[in-house]
Image (cartoon, rainbow, N blue to C red):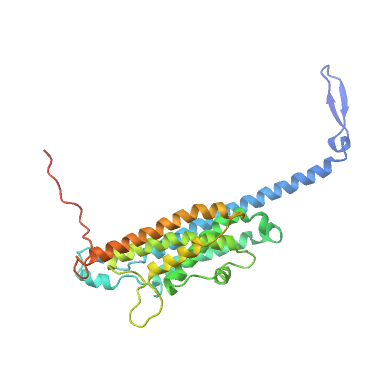
Amino acid sequence: MARSKRTFSGQEKTVETPSAMSPFMPMFESFRNELDEHHDRRERIIKASRDITAQSKKIFQDLLSATVITAPLCGGHSKESRADCVDRARQLKTAIPEKVKQENAPRYETINGLFASVAPDMQGINAWRYQRQVSPGVQEYVEAVSFQHYLETQRLITYGEAQGKLPGGVMLTEDDYLLGLFDLVGELMRFAITSMATSGEIPGIRKGNEEGGDMVLDLRSLRAYFEALDTRGAWVHRDVEKKMEVMKTCVEKVENAVYGLIVRGKERPKGWIPEEKGPEPVESY
């Protein structure tokens, strides 16, 4: 279809439309539409991944807050003795407090809804095309569910169990599962140090004829398995190298805390925990 334009002198001139100018324009318009759909799909997945990450962080923060269920009562102002507070410290292989379950239930529902919203965009080849965009959220979610699984069972969640926690249509790659377990070590470190500072005992320690080891042995075993990994040549190698150093640092912090507990523990009475009052005031001159 022709359209009219005017020259510099004001006379009308006929200009052909681009479609009449080139037979390739419809083809490039279809390319433009495909690219627009790709960018819109990519932005939706990135936003959902960020929201999943935020909700997952809230989940394991609540799980950590339940590490010591009587922490506010152990400041010396309660009628309960401090030793009684220590005896009620959060232990491994016990049920998650009902209050924490109720607070985390809507977060799990939100995460499932976010995964379900992007599942249609990640079917077929698109599951790999947008894997890097959804990967941060999947890793954070694996960290959250594996942390809760360890607190309840003192056992590492398997790949199949982690895949079962995701809604249908969302793929869990071995790389995301592995990187999520690397991040799990940081939460285990926080749990171990908080538990030892409050109870004066190593978390997960076995008594009598119970099989297995304590939490420190679990972390050391996990570190040994991670160090045995050979990811050279894989795209995940760069991420593994970064997380490997952080993982080693976290395990070393727990080991140092255990050494201090064993050495210093002999100098302290049973049930001792630090006072909450601050340092003594110093007179100024």
Q: Left or right of 68: which side holds 40?
A: right
The extreme top residue here reads: 9
Q: Left or right of 115: which side holds 22?
A: right
| Residue at position x 24%, y 73% in the image | 84
The x and y percentages for residue 241 are 52, 53
Q: Quadrant of residue 122?
A: bottom right
91 or 58: which is nearer to us? 91
* Quarter of the image that includes the C terminus: top left
162 or 48: which is nearer to us? 162
Q: Left or right of 66: which side holds 282?
A: left
132 versus 283 height, above or below = below
42 versus 14 height, above or below = below
| Residue at position x 15%, y 48% in the image | 281
48 or 136: which is nearer to us? 136
| Residue at position x 26%, y 70% in the image | 86
The x and y percentages for residue 67 are 35, 66
| Residue at position x 86%, y 20% in the image | 11
Q: Is residue 261 visible?
A: yes
Q: Quadrant of residue 204?
A: bottom left
Q: Is residue 106 visible?
A: no
151 or 79: which is nearer to us? 151
18 versus 58 height, above or below = above
* Quarter of the image that includes the N terminus: top right
The x and y percentages for residue 132 are 61, 53
Q: Quadrant of residue 268?
A: bottom left
